[in-house]
């Protein structure tokens, strides 16, 4: 078990949410018309953004969170992709937390990450462990 980490400053939080908001401008969402943006903050301080990319098959849609994470890995490699926090927003500013698939992918690279997402009263924070308790992990494979 790793040591608890200090909370993000409110400036860091605002910057991460702002990066996520910028990202939904590039969303490709002609089927749902629901534009989502995400931004991941890595332990090294780097920020990577992502948007949802839909597909006519529907099922091949990639959520904003996974786009951001995969972008970080493509740029820095998996060893440097340690997620400190991730912010997720949408163009309707409605409550929306990461889907189950994205929770599993966030956990892979950030089991202790903070997740900032729109709740009923605006942006709220949960820990990854709160969002995906007792999750499947690589520890089962060793
Ligand atoms: N979506 C995301 O990108 N992230 C989420 O956390 C929830 C859902 C996208 C997928 C799809 O393009 C659209 O929102 C509607 O489900």
Image (cartoon, helix red, strand yellow):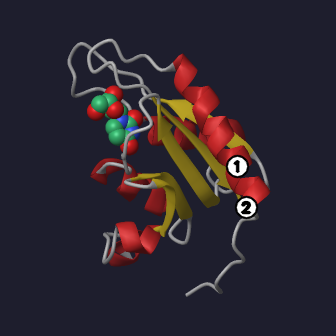
Question: At 20% across and 18% down in the image, what residue appears?
Answer: 57
Tell me: residue 77, above or below residue 83: above
Ligand 1 neighbours mark 2 (CB distance < 8 Å): no
Percent coordinates x, y for residue 14 in the rendering: 70, 49
Q: How many marks?
A: 2
Q: Can residue 117 be seen at all in this image of the molecule?
A: yes
Look at mark 2 in the image and give the residue it sits on: 43
Question: At 75% across and 55% down in the image, what residue appears?
Answer: 12
How far apart are labels 2 and 1 at the CA level?
A: 17 Å
Which label is found at residue 135? none
Report crowding for label 1: few under 14, some 14 to 19, many 20 or more residues within 10 A (C-alpha).
few
Please identify the residue farthest to the front as the structure is shown. Answer: 121
Q: Quadrant of residue 56?
A: top left
Residue mark closest to the camera, 2 vs 1: 1
Question: At 26% across and 15% down in the image, what residue appears?
Answer: 31
Question: At 55% across and 87% down in the image, what residue appears?
Answer: 1
SS label for mark 2:
loop
The answer to whether residue 103 is left or right of residue 71 is: left
Pointers 2 and 1 in contact (C-beta within 8 Å): no
The answer to whether residue 92 is left or right of residue 113 is: left
Look at mark 1 in the image and give the residue it sits on: 14
Q: Nearest the camera: 86 or 109? A: 86
Percent coordinates x, y for residue 52 in the rendering: 43, 28
The answer to whether residue 136 is left or right of residue 15 is: left
SS label for mark 1:
helix
Q: Can residue 109 be seen at all in this image of the molecule?
A: no
Q: Nearest the camera: 123 or 121? A: 121
Report crowding for label 2: few under 14, some 14 to 19, many 20 or more residues within 10 A (C-alpha).
some
Q: In which quarter of the image is ligand 1?
A: top left
Percent coordinates x, y for residue 27 in the rendering: 48, 20
């Amino acid at each position: 078990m790793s040591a608890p980490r200090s909370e993000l400053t409110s400036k860091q939080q605002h910057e991460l949410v702002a990066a996520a908001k910028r990202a939904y401008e590039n969303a490709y969402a002609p089927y749902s018309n629901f534009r989502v943006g995400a931004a991941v903050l890595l332990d090294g301080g780097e920020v990577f953004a992502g948007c949802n990319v839909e597909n006519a098959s529907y099922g091949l849609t990639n959520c904003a969170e996974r786009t951001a994470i995969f972008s970080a890995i493509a740029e820095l490699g998996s060893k440097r992709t340690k997620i400190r926090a991730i912010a997720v927003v949408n163009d309707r500013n409605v409550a929306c937390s990461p889907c189950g698939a994205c929770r599993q992918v966030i956990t892979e690279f950030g089991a202790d990450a903070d997740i900032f997402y729109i709740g009923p009263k605006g942006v709220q924070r949960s820990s990854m462990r709160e969002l995906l308790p007792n999750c499947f992990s690589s520890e089962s494979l060793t």
